[in-house]
Amino acid sequence: MIRPGFTGCTLDRADRLRHDAEALAAAAGDWRARLLRLAALDPEVDDAGRLGWGSLADAAENAELVLLGLDDRQVPHFAAVDPDEPPVRGRSPALFRMLGLMPPEEASLYAAARSVVDWHMRHRFCAVCGYGTQAFRAGWARKCPNCAAEHFPRTDPVVIMLIEHDDRVLVGRQPGWPPERYSALAGFLEPGESIEEAVARETLEEAGVRVHGIRYVASQPWPFPSSLMIACIGRAEDDALTVDPNELEDALWVPRAGIRAALSEEPGAPFAAPPPYAIAHTLMRAWLDEA
Ligand SMILES: [Zn+2]
């Protein structure tokens, strides 16, 4: 079974409470309610990679609360947005070490919390009229008190694809990546495109390769800040590469044995694979398993 990273959160998102002011107040007043500990969007994790929680008393007095959901004992889980905290830029190196430890269901919960808290921090003003907005729907939207526009957290779709030719797949390397790291090609969907059209366009732009037979494999939230990675496999018409140096530093066709060696981190592998919580890793494994 394909189980991408950042998926499998076990909380009930409890949409029914988001519209029910009384139930929401009761959840926030529940003595068992837990607040996700975040410092500049980074979580606190224990040695097993499990998320750290406090109580709602830890939130700033004027904080906006996001109801993340209820666990199987109906305990409400929240995140808080401090209106006085400036937006966070980039991600800390410590975070990637933490993600390496986190069980997928914890990473999934963290991804949801991080993306929505980050969205609140960067969307405090109405995109229509510029007025300051207020959180509503239990922190899953913002509303403008001036023009009544409602704003919702965005998810940005990204296609990520393994293109195959003659039992090899195409991997590329972007400047600034860790040494030896190669991964599946990827790019943002543009307005007006289907997933298949975006896969074909990005592969042609980045590597000069025409593809067909594109098929969907799996998807994964990627909370930096709010992408949805849509993993696909496609077939190349031929293996001639014309790499766009603005997009990629290098691209390679790698046979099955090379992909297997990279995923197993064998010495002498043709490249360093992306980490297991990245869907490129999942996609490479899925391709190997198809044979
Ligand atoms: Zn407005």
Image (cartoon, grey):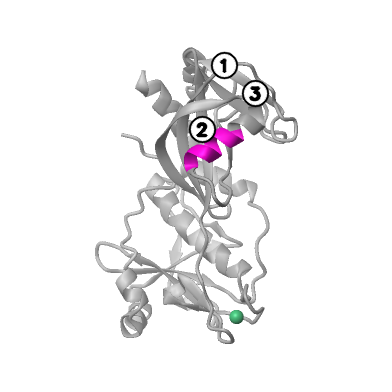
Q: Quadrant of the N terminus?
A: top left
Three-letter amino acid code at disc 1? Asp
Using the numbered discs, state the Cα–Cα distance from disc 1 to disc 3 in whole angstroms: 14 Å
Reply above or below: 243 against 142: above
Q: Position of residue 49 (x, y in %)?
A: 45, 48
- What secondary structure predominates along the stretch shown in magenta? helix
Residue labelled with disc 3: 251
Q: Earlier in the sequence, mark 1 or mark 3?
A: 1
Q: Quadrant of the C terminus?
A: top left
Three-letter amino acid code at disc 3? Ala
Reply above or below: 33 against 255: below
Q: Is residue 135 magenta?
A: no
Instruction: Name which residue lies at 48% across and 32% down.
Output: 281
Residue labelled with disc 1: 238
Q: Which class describes the residues within 10 Å of circle 2: few (<14), some (14-19), or many (20+)? A: many
Q: Which class describes the residues within 10 Å of circle 1: few (<14), some (14-19), or many (20+)? A: few
Q: In terms of secondary structure, where does tag 3 sit?
A: strand
Q: In terms of secondary structure, where does tag 2 sit?
A: strand
Visible residue check, residue 77: yes
CB of mark 1 near ligand 1 (< 8 Å)? no
Considering every residue shown, the one lying at the far front of the view is 192
Tell me the quarter of the picture where residue 60 sits. Answer: bottom right
Give the magenta range: 195-202
Residue labelled with disc 2: 161
Mark in front: 1 vs 3:
1
Q: Position of residue 286 (x, y in %)?
A: 40, 28
Residue 281 versus residue 206: which sits nearer the camera? 206
Reply above or below: 163 against 176: above
Instruction: Name which residue lies at 52% across and 57% down.
Output: 43
Visible residue check, residue 278: no
